[in-house]
Image (spheres, rainbow, N blue to C red):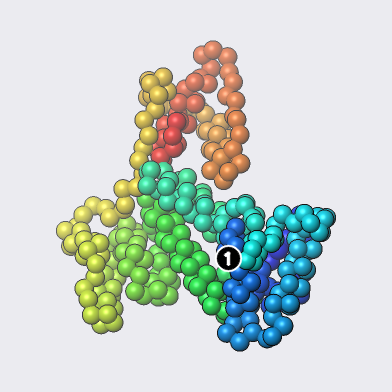
C-alpha cells in the first residue's frame, strides 16, 4: 500500500489484471477487518454512476481475488476475503500490511521518544520509513477513498519524518540535518514544526545568524499568508537565540540508572574497544528487531563484569533500559 499497490505471496508478485480490480482490493485493504457492504464497494470502485451490471461484475472480481490470495483453499473455506452480510471483509493481521506495520512502528517510536530513548525511536523510524516505495496507492485512480487514505498516510509519514528529526537532534546530529530540513521547509512552508527544527539545526551547527533569519522568514510567511504571528514554540526559539542560550537542542535523552553492581566501578576501561564494538553491533541488531543473547565470558579477574558495566553505562546514557 505504501507505493504502487502490490500483493506478494512467499515473495512472488501476484498479478492484478485491471484498474477496477486494484481499486476493489485497495478499498478492502483500507478498511481491512471491517465489513463493507456491496453498495459501498460498488460506489468505491465505480463512483457515482456505476453500470447496471456492477454488482455482478463485483462478484467476479471477488471470486478472482479469492483464488489469487488463497489458491489452495476450498471454495467454502476462504479465510482472507470472506462473505459477511451485507458484503465482504478482508481479514489481515498487522504483519501482512506494510501500512499497518508502518503505523505500528511509528507509534512505538513516539513512545520511545517520550520515554527518553531516541536511539530506539530512530531504529523503529528507520524501519517504518523504509517501507515506503513511493506515494501510497500510487497506481490507483483518484477515487474518494484513495484520496482520503493517501492523504492520511502522507500525514503520518511526514509526522514520522519529523519524529526522526527530533531524535537526530536529541543525539546531536544537527549539522547533517540542515539541508534536509531546508528542502522540507520549502516543500511544506507553513509547517511550524519543521521550521522550528530547521532553526534548532542551524543554531546547533554554529549558524546563529542563519537560525535567526530562518525565524524571520517563518514569521513573514505566517503573517503574509494566514495573517497570524508564529506560534509560541517558534517565538520561544527566537527569544532563546536573542538571549544567546547555549543550546536549543531538545532534552529528549533520558539516561537510565544502572543496577548498583554495574554502577560501582567508574574507573576508565582501557584496551577493550574491540569487544565494545562487538557489543555495539549486537545492540544495533537488537534495535533493528534482530536481537539475541550475547554471552560475555572470562576467567575471574579478567574484566568481564567491568566490560559489561561499561557497555551498560554507554547505552544507558542514550536512554536504554538496563
Determine whether the residue tagged by mark 1 lies in a helix, strand or loop: helix
In-front residue for pair 54/175: 54
Residue at horizontal 47 percent and vertical 45 percent from the top? 120
Residue 303's spot in the image, x, y percent? Answer: 51, 20
> Residue 23 lies in what quarter of the image?
bottom right
Residue that badge 1 annotates: 30
Q: In the figure, is residue 18 to the left or right of 267? A: right
Quarter of the image for the C terminus: give it.
top left
Residue 314's spot in the image, x, y percent? Answer: 43, 35
Residue 38's spot in the image, x, y percent? Answer: 64, 71
In the picture shown, does residue 235 fall above or below 268? Answer: below
Residue at horizontal 82 percent and vertical 55 percent from the top? 74
In-front residue for pair 142/125: 142
Residue 135's spot in the image, x, y percent? Answer: 57, 71
Residue at horizontal 68 percent and vertical 86 percent from the top? 51
Residue at horizontal 65 percent and vertical 56 percent from the top? 91
- The residue most toward the front is 85
- The residue most toward the top is 300
In-front residue for pair 281/157: 157
Amino acid at each position: 500500500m505504501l507505493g504502487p499497490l502490490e500483493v506478494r505471496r512467499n515473495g512472488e508478485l501476484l498479478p492484478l489484471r485491471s484498474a477496477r480490480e486494484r481499486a476493489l482490493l485497495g478499498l478492502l485493504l483500507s478498511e481491512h477487518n471491517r465489513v463493507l457492504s456491496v453498495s459501498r464497494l460498488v460506489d468505491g470502485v465505480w463512483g457515482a454512476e456505476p453500470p447496471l451490471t456492477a454488482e455482478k461484475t463485483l462478484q467476479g472480481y471477488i471470486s478472482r481475488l479469492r483464488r489469487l490470495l488463497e489458491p489452495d483453499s476450498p471454495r467454502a473455506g476462504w479465510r482472507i476475503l470472506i462473505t459477511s452480510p451485507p458484503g465482504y471483509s478482508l481479514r489481515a493481521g498487522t504483519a501482512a500490511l506494510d501500512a499497518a506495520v508502518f503505523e505500528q512502528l511509528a507509534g512505538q517510536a513516539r513512545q520511545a521518544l517520550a520515554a527518553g530513548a531516541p536511539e530506539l525511536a530512530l531504529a523503529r523510524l528507520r524501519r517504518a520509513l523504509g517501507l515506503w516505495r513511493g506515494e501510497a496507492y500510487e497506481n490507483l485512480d483518484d477515487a474518494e477513498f484513495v484520496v482520503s487514505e493517501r492523504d492520511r498516510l502522507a500525514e503520518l509519514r511526514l509526522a514520522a519524518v519529523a519524529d526522526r528529526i527530533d531524535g537526530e537532534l536529541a543525539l546531536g546530529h544537527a549539522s547533517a540535518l540542515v539541508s534536509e530540513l531546508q528542502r522540507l521547509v520549502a516543500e511544506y512552508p507553513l509547517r511550524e514544526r519543521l521550521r522550528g527544527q530547521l532553526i534548532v539545526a542551524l543554531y546547533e551547527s554554529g549558524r546563529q545568524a542563519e537560525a535567526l533569519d530562518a525565524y524571520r522568514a517563518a514569521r513573514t510567511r505566517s503573517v503574509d499568508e494566514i495573517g497570524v504571528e508564529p506560534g509560541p514554540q517558534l517565538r520561544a526559539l527566537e527569544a532563546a537565540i536573542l538571549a544567546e542560550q547555549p543550546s536549543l537542542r531538545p532534552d529528549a535523552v533520558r539516561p537510565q540508572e544502572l543496577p548498583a553492581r554495574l554502577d560501582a566501578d567508574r574507573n576508565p576501561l582501557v584496551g577493550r574497544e574491540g569487544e565494545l564494538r562487538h557489543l555495539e553491533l549486537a545492540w544495533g541488531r537488537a534495535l533493528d528487531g534482530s536481537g539475541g543473547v550475547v554471552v560475555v565470558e572470562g576467567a575471574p579477574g579478567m574484566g568481564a563484569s567491568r566490560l559489561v558495566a561499561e557497555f551498560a553505562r554507554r547505552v544507558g546514557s542514550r536512554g536504554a533500559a538496563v
